[in-house]
Amino acid sequence: MRGAGGCAGPAERGRYAGRMLLPLSTPHATRLEALAECGSTNTVLVAHAAEGWPEFSVVVTDNQTGGRGRLGRSWVAPAGQTLAVSVLLRPTFSLEAFGWLPLIAGVAMARAVREVLASASEAAPESKAESKASESKAESVASEAAAGLRPLVTLKWPNDVLIGVRDADAGRTEKKVSGLLAELVPSPGSGAPAVVLGAGLNLTIPADGLPVDTATSLTLHGADADGLPDRALSAYLRELRALYGLLQQHDGDADASGIRRMVSEECATLGRSVRIQLPGGGSETARAVELDTAGQLVVRRARDGALQSVAAGDVTHLRYE
């Protein structure tokens, strides 16, 4: 049988037996559906949201075949090597605060990635013996943690999670391990819209299988592949639920809830020189200054020194300073 969005339903989940069981994640979701294959978890959950599924319903797969990223881009997800997850939220606060939702999802994912990598570091200190990497790309990337380089997990505004490695000789490089996408779900009549937060996380993609040079995966930084989907997902859902609860409790006020401070602390974009590709075309080179009360990025334009708030755009970090 096929579920919404052409996805394999529960009856077709045989290949998950013994591999993608989610005992750690299930308690953090009101309803959790793990699908063997899916075009887009967001598409599936958007359809179910209209059917009245409860808040914090979750759809997850490790074989997403038609994922979408920001600005209409496709999300490349090799079968069995990535995690695609969507979470349904039904905020009661005003639409003006909805811009914080993808940002708290990014913070939740950054914390989850950091937790997974910290656990790997504690569990396998002997991996330092492998610090002599060969010239192959796979071995050189896999040995980053082993060589004593400290992974830096940060958020790039608005919703990419990066793993950076500091090297005294080469400086620091950043690679994307996760991307997020929020979609509004209109409510029938005059009711408030729901929001579906989608996230893609690279779990076990080998270095020679990465879709682009700017991508990475958890196992390339030392994460243990055993039980990784459940460990990463449970940490993400736990952190997202806590952050979302704060925002709800304070009626969407990012300052009273501490959300603006927490997002700003995680956001590596702030203080950096950036290039912003704007949705309508054109670009700006600027310095990222702060996040405003709606979660927009405030930048100081290089061409005239004026401040500008950016609600959406593709941001490139130009250099470390």
Image: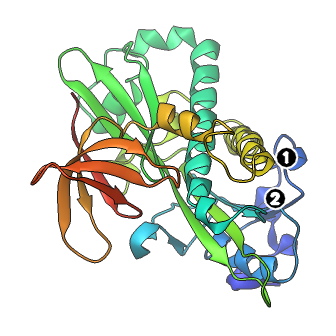
Query: Please, is residue 150 above or below residue 94 in the view?
Result: above
Query: Dividing the picture into quarters, in which one does residue 242 lie?
Result: top right
Residue 281 found in image quarter: bottom left
- Tell me the residue that label 1 is attached to: 28
| Distance in Å between CA atoms under marks 2 and 1 | 8 Å
Q: Amino acid at mark 1?
A: His
Rendered-image quadrant of the N terminus:
bottom right
Rendered-image quadrant of the C terminus:
top left
Give how far across and how far down residue 289 sits, in percent.
32, 41
Q: Is residue 75 left or right of residue 276?
A: right
Q: Residue at x 42, y 17 (%)?
A: 146
Q: Is residue 163 left or right of residue 255?
A: left
Quarter of the image holding residue 167?
Answer: top left
- Label 2 sits on what residue type? Phe
Give residue 87's position: percent from left, percent from top: 73, 60
Residue at 52% in and 50% down: 293
Please give the count of numbered marks on the rendered protein.
2
